[in-house]
Amino acid sequence: MSTKLRQIIKIEDSNLANATKTEYGYRLKQFCHDSVIKSYEELIDVPSEELENILVSYCKFLLTKVTQKILSANTVPKMFKPLKN
């Protein structure tokens, strides 16, 4: 069994523009607020298969917000940028 080494870089420690850091931080907080994952540590520690299921559920949640016209469809891709691995 091989072990995949992952480098964890906090948004604050990255070389992203300040506006991007602010946007990513906001989107991650929204994800934690609206999903079963409630902290960055949980996000990092959750197994990949479980995370995939959580993200599918989050997509469905966002799509209901789009169909209810609470959220613009153009905003949805921005919601996932900070979660990219």
Image (cartoon, rainbow, N blue to C red):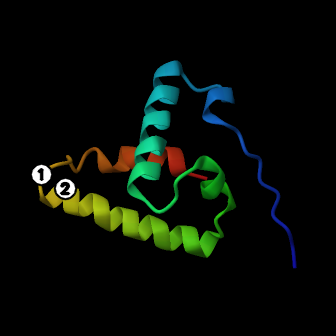
Residue drawn at x 60%, y 48% as measured from the top left: 40
CB atoms of marks 1 and 2 within 8 Å:
yes
Foreground residue among 30 and 72: 30
Please determine whether, in this image, residue 8 is positioned above or below residue 59.
above
Tell me the tag on residue 4: none
Residue drawn at x 29%, y 44% as measured from the top left: 75
Residue 32 image point, x, y percent: 47, 51
Residue 83 image point, x, y percent: 53, 50
Q: Which residue type does callout 1 highlight?
A: Lys
Left or right of 48? Residue 63 is left
The Cα atoms of the two marked residues, 1 and 2, are separated by 5 Å
Foreground residue among 62 and 32: 32
Residue drawn at x 87%, y 79% as measured from the top left: 1
Please determine whether, in this image, residue 28 is positioned above or below residue 51.
above
What is the quadrant of residue 78 in the picture? top left
What is the quadrant of residue 68 in the picture? bottom left
- Neighbours of disc 2 within 10 Å: few (<14), some (14-19), many (20+): some
Q: Which residue type does callout 2 highlight?
A: Val
Q: Which residue is mark 1?
A: 69
Q: Which residue is mark 2?
A: 66
Query: What element does badge 2 sit on?
Result: helix
Query: What element does badge 1 sit on?
Result: loop
Left or right of 31? Residue 1 is right
Please determine whether, in this image, residue 12 is positioned above or below residue 52.
above
- Neighbours of disc 1 within 10 Å: few (<14), some (14-19), many (20+): few
Residue 43 image point, x, y percent: 60, 56
